[in-house]
Each structure stands twice: as structure tokens, then as C-alpha cells.
Image (spheres, rainbow, N blue to C red):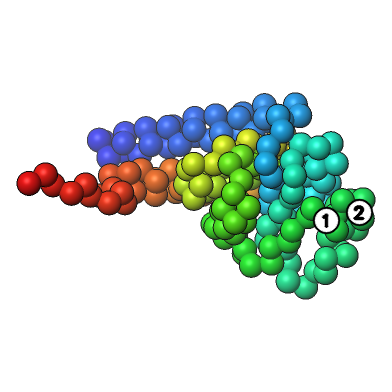
Amino acid sequence: MRSLAAILLAAFIWTVGLLSFTARIENSTPMPAPPRADGIVALTGAGSNERLAAAVSLLEDGKAQRMLVSGVNPEASREDIRTVSKAVRRLYDCCVDLDFTAADTVGNARETADWANNLRYKSLIVVTADYHMPRAMLELRATMPDIDLRPYPVVTKVVNAKRWWRTSGGARLMILEYSKYLAILGREAVRKLGPSDAPAQDKKA
């Protein structure tokens, strides 16, 4: 009986967490225009057209100096990305960088960190799909703890955050995102319990 009660309690806690997670996503949009930052990073994935268009719009509004598109399909050309993002050529040619290396959110975080560090940026506007933003911010903050990251979630056609449970695809996506989010939270909690990466101070004689 105790084991069954424990299972039911765990299931209840997990479900409450899922509902809180999806409510957070639902309430994250529409997002007001963020304050100006050094750079903008757009994370590609399902619903990339909406993500790229939103990021380019911020760049055109002068919200940052440069923009990185992370996780571009290696088969896509630079002109393909410009067409999809509907960017003005002059601005696109001067101020948009493409990353073809990242294959997942962990890769997005690493490539974004390298890009930001090379340019000595201290603040970034992060543009990605609304459902992807919580997990993306965890990965980015773990990789760039010293950079000010400002989320700018975008509504896409991939899932309706207000009615995600009404379709099997929407429910599957939200549950998967929530599960990945919990996994990253667990990973970071374990890391914090480990030894510090900071060099030990020399002992006084």
C-alpha cells in the first residue's frame, strides 16, 4: 500500500508540475519588446520561420548590434535563411551570423557562448519558440552564467500553448519538453553538489 501511495503521490506532483510548466509557457506571450542588448540569438527548430522573423524584426528595430542564427541546417544556404527570415539584405549581410554546427539545444548553448565571448558581448536577447524557451534558458544560463540573457519567446504553429492537450501532437510535445526540462534541472542540481570549478586559493604559510 505504501508503495502504491508513493507512486500516486509522485504522479500527482509530476502532473501539477506539468500544468505549472504549460501555464508558464501560455502566459509567456505576447512578450513586450525587450530592452536593447549587445546581441540577439535565434535558436532554430520546429517553427523556425516564426523564430527567425521575430529575431530579425528585433534587429531591424535596433535592439542589438548583431544577430546569431544557431543550429542552421547544413543543407540550407545563407540566402535561404535570408528569404525565410525576410531580412533586409543590407542589414542581413552586415549583421547576421550563421551557426551550422549546433544539432540540439546543448549545441546551441555552446555555439552561442563562443559567439558572444568572441564579440565580448555581455547581454543577449534569446529568441526561440514559446514551448522551447524554459529549457533553452536553462542550457544557455548553465553555459553563460556571466551573460545577461533576456528571453523573447515566440508563438509558432507547432503547438497552441493554450490548448495543447486537445491534440495528441501537442500533448506529446509538451510532455516531452517538460520531461527534458526536469532532466536538466536534475543535472544542474547534481553539478552544484559537486566540487567547485574555481581554482583553490593558495594556503597561507
Residue in the image at 75% along x and 26% along y = 32
Q: Nearer the viewer, residue 92 or 57?
A: 92
Depth check, front residue: 84 or 61: 61
Q: To which residue does mark 1 refer? A: 94
Q: Going by the picture, which residue comes out furthest to the front?
A: 205
Q: What kind of residue is marked 2?
A: Arg
Does the image show residue 169?
no
Q: Secondary structure at mark 1?
A: helix
Neighbour tally class for label 2: few under 14, some 14-19, many 20 plus, Cα within 10 Å: few
- Identified at 80% across, 42% down, the residue is 59
Give how far across and how far down residue 105 sits, in percent. 58, 55
Q: Amino acid at mark 1?
A: Cys
Element marked by disc 2: helix
| Mark 2, residue position | 90
**Whole-percent x, y for residue 78 in the image:** 83, 65
- Image quarter in which the N terminus is found: top left
Residue 49 is situated, as x and y percent measured from the top left of the image, at: 82, 51
- Seen from the viewer's position, the closer of residues 90 and 98 is 90
Mark 1 and mark 2 in contact? Answer it, CB < 8 Å. Answer: yes
The number of discs equals 2
Query: x, y percentage for residue 109?
Result: 56, 53
Residue 204 in sight from this viewpoint = yes
Are there few (<14), some (14-19), or many (20+) residues within 10 Å of tag 1? Answer: few
State which quadrant residue 118 falls in.
bottom right
Question: Which residue sits at x=60%, y=30%?
Answer: 24
Residue nearest the observer in this picture, 53 or 169: 53
Dot label at residue 121: none
State left or right for residue 133 relative to residue 97.
Answer: left
